Image (cartoon, grey):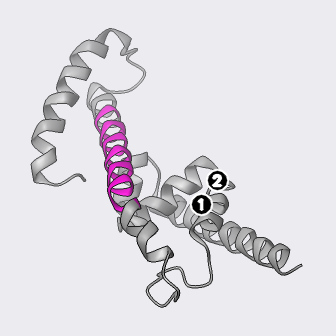
């Protein structure tokens, strides 16, 4: 889920965290399931932190391209980045996570399902809902800007 380089460090963190949190294990599921869930959550948290760092590093570059007279280089085209960020905030947390993992980070539905403890179908459904809500939010924003 995180690549070989980060996996070794993350594996150490997972086992340290498991050792520290072993007292909180209630036995409601098998120990393997509990460890897998703990590991998956830590991997997702790691990916979130990593994507935040990447966004911070690339922000100055994005700001430079926005200052130019033409918008040809803009990936978003007519959609302003701030509008997209606002639209993302309107999504339910699970839908937002699935959208980011699939459409931004490039994970497959099977991988997302493993990370979040959901089925492939649930991942697809959440992604569809997220895309539909984003379209609505961006369309509403576009209409309000024209008025």
Crowd tier of the residue under label 1, counting other residues whose Cα lies within 10 Å: few below 14, some 14–19, many 20 or above? few
Give the vertical position of 36 relative to 92 (above or below): above
Decide which of 23, 57 is in the foreground and name it: 57
Decide which of 95, 31 is in the foreground and name it: 95
Looking at the picture, how far across and down is residue 105, in whole percent? 36, 64
Say if the magenta span includes residue 80. Answer: no
Crowd tier of the residue under label 2, counting other residues whose Cα lies within 10 Å: few below 14, some 14–19, many 20 or above? few
Residue at the right extreme of this rendering:
147
Q: Residue at x 10, y 50 (%)?
A: 5
Decide which of 142, 93 is in the foreground and name it: 142
Residue at numbered disc 1: 85
- Which type of secondary structure does the marked residue at label 2 adopt? helix
Decide which of 36, 105 is in the foreground and name it: 105
In the picture, which quadrant includes the C terminus?
bottom right
Residue at numbered disc 2: 89
Query: For the stretch drawn in magenta, what is the main secondary structure?
Result: helix
Q: Residue at x 42, y 60 (%)?
A: 101
With 40 as the anchor, is 72 left or right in this view? right
Q: Evaluate if marks 2 and 1 touch, with contact meaning CB atoms under 8 Å apart.
A: yes
Looking at the picture, how far across and down is residue 30, in whole percent? 32, 27
Q: Residue at x 80, y 75 (%)?
A: 145
Kindly report the distance in space between the C-alpha atoms of the residues bearing marks 2 and 1: 6 Å
Q: Residue at x 31, y 15 (%)?
A: 21
Residues in magenta, as a range:
38-59
Looking at the picture, how far across and down is residue 78, in whole percent? 62, 84
Looking at the picture, how far across and down is residue 47, in whole percent? 33, 48
- Which type of secondary structure does the marked residue at label 1 adopt? helix
Q: Give the quadrant of residue 10.
A: top left
Give the vertical position of 67 relative to 82 (above or below): below
Q: Give the quadrant of residue 81.
A: bottom right
């Amino acid at each position: 889920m995180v690549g070989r380089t980060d996996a070794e460090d993350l594996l150490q963190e997972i086992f340290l965290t498991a050792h520290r949190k072993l007292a909180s294990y209630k036995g409601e599921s098998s120990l393997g399931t509990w460890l897998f869930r703990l590991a998956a959550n830590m991997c997702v948290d790691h990916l979130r932190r990593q994507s935040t760092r990447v966004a911070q590093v690339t922000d100055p570059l994005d700001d430079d391209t926005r200052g130019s007279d033409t918008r040809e280089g803009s990936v978003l085209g007519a959609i302003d980045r701030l509008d997209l960020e606002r639209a993302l905030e309107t999504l339910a947390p699970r839908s937002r996570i699935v959208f980011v993992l699939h459409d931004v980070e490039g994970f497959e539905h099977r991988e997302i399902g493993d990370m979040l403890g959901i089925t492939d179908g649930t991942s697809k459904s959440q992604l569809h809902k997220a895309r539909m809500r984003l379209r609505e939010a961006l369309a509403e924003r576009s209409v309000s800007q024209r008025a």
